[in-house]
Amino acid sequence: MSSPRAQPFPWEEAIGFGLGVLRLSPAAFWAMTPRELAYAIAAVTGRNGAPLDRASFDALMRRFPDGRKQ
């Protein structure tokens, strides 16, 4: 079984998204880390991963309740 070939980084798409969609200045774009750019892209496109499962959501609700229960 052969290993998959690494794909080149999609600079054209990344720069276009950073400058065109995110409206970053060139200086701000080039100052970002790849992880910061990935998070910004995910936030805008909604690709933040899978939603919480029910158990995780229930745990979050217990930890941060909306109000006092009577």
Image (cartoon, rainbow, N blue to C red):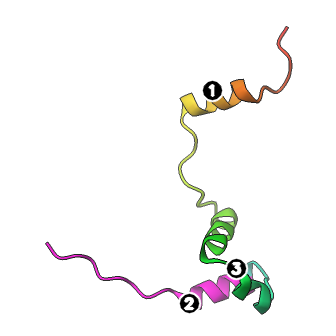
Say which residue appears at 58% left-offset and 33% top-offset.
56
- Mark 3 vs 2: CB contact within 8 A: no
Amino acid carrying label 1: it is Asp
Measured Cα–Cα span from mark 1 to mark 3: 35 Å
Residue 11 marker: 2
* Boundaries of the magenta span: 1-20
Q: Which residue is mark 3?
A: 32
Query: Residue 24's x, y, as percent?
Result: 79, 83
| Nearer the camera: disc 1 or disc 3 | 3
Q: Which residue is mark 1?
A: 58
Amino acid carrying label 2: it is Trp
Measured Cα–Cα span from mark 2 to mark 1: 41 Å
Query: Residue 48's x, y, as percent?
Result: 60, 57
Query: Residue 32's x, y, as percent?
Result: 70, 79
Measured Cα–Cα span from mark 3 to mark 2: 14 Å
70 lies left or right of 7: right
Q: Is 23 above or below relative to 1?
A: below
Say which residue appears at 57% left-offset and 92% top-offset.
12
Mark 2 or 1, nearer chain start: 2
Quarter assignment of residue 35? bottom right
